[in-house]
Each structure stands twice: as structure tokens, then as C-alpha cells.
Image (cartoon, rainbow, N blue to C red):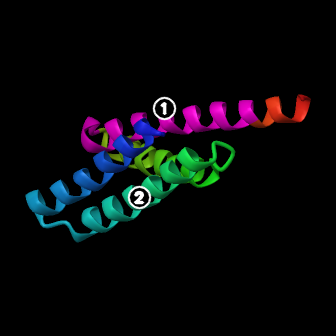
Amino acid sequence: MDSLGFMYAVVLAAGGTYGYVKSGSLPSLAAGVLFGSAIGMGAYQVSKNPENFYLALGTSTVLSGVMGSRFYSSGKIMPAGVICGISVAMALRYAYKGFSLQKAVKTT
């Protein structure tokens, strides 16, 4: 089971909800729920079949770029810098595990 992936999904959805409650930001709510749902689905897919990592990898990579850009332009650690860092770490994790698994399957 991809526990880290599911925790990542909850953090994204909760962060978007918090942004909405704190400042009334509907885009924060929409992005949090959208990205959280996509990562949740990706974590589910990885849990069922570790070779099916592309949704989780793609979503975390896109989120890394979006939040990295926001962090670069605003300079604010919270939330853009933190989410960017977590997203980069998760993208690297999915890439490493997924491509290592594919390489192992091809060599046997």
C-alpha cells in the first residue's frame, strides 16, 4: 500500500480546504481537491499495481512546477515552498521506484 502517497493526497486536499476557510480562496479549494484527488487515485493505482505509477508521477511533477513557480515569484515558504518540496520528493520517489521496477522486469 502506498501510505506516503495517500498521506500526500490528504495534505493537498486539507491545504486547499484550509486556504479556502482562511481566506475564502476558491482557487485554493479547487486546486487542493483536484490535485489531492489525482494523487489519491495515483496512490491507489500504485497500491494495486506498482508498475502503474504514471498518474502519481505526472501529478506530483506538475504540482512541483506550479508551486515552484509560485515560490519563486512570491518567496513565501508557506504554502508554496513546502508543497513544492514535498512534491519534488514524491516525484523523485515515484520515478525511482517505478523506473527501477520496470528495469528489473526487463532484465529478467
Classify residue 61 as left or right of residue 16.
Answer: right
Classify residue 51 as left or right of residue 39.
Answer: right
Q: Nearer the viewer, residue 43 or 8?
A: 43
Classify residue 16 as left or right of residue 98.
Answer: left
Q: Main secondary structure of the magenta part?
A: helix
What amino acid is at disc 1? Ala
Q: Disc number at residue 35? A: 2
Query: In the rendered image of this protein, does residue 18 appear above or below residue 51?
Result: below
Q: Nearer the viewer, residue 39 or 2?
A: 2
Residue 85 is a magenta residue: yes
How dense is the environment of label 1, judged by Cα within 10 Å: few (below 14), some, or many (20 and up)? Answer: some
Q: Which residue is mark 1?
A: 89
Quadrant occupied by the C terminus: top right
In this view, the residue farthest toward the left is: 22
In this view, the residue farthest toward the right is: 107
Q: Position of residue 45 (x, y in %)?
A: 56, 53
Report the residue at 78% width, 37% height from top.
102
| Region rendered in magenta | 76-101
Q: Position of residue 70 (x, y in %)?
A: 38, 49
Q: Disc number at residue 33? A: none
Report the residue at 27% width, 43% height from top.
79
Q: Position of residue 14 (x, y in %)?
A: 23, 52
Q: Nearer the viewer, residue 29 or 94?
A: 94
Work out how far the residue at label 1 is from the one at label 2, CA to CA, in angstroms: 16 Å
Instruction: Say which label, 1 or 2, has the lower sequence index.
Output: 2
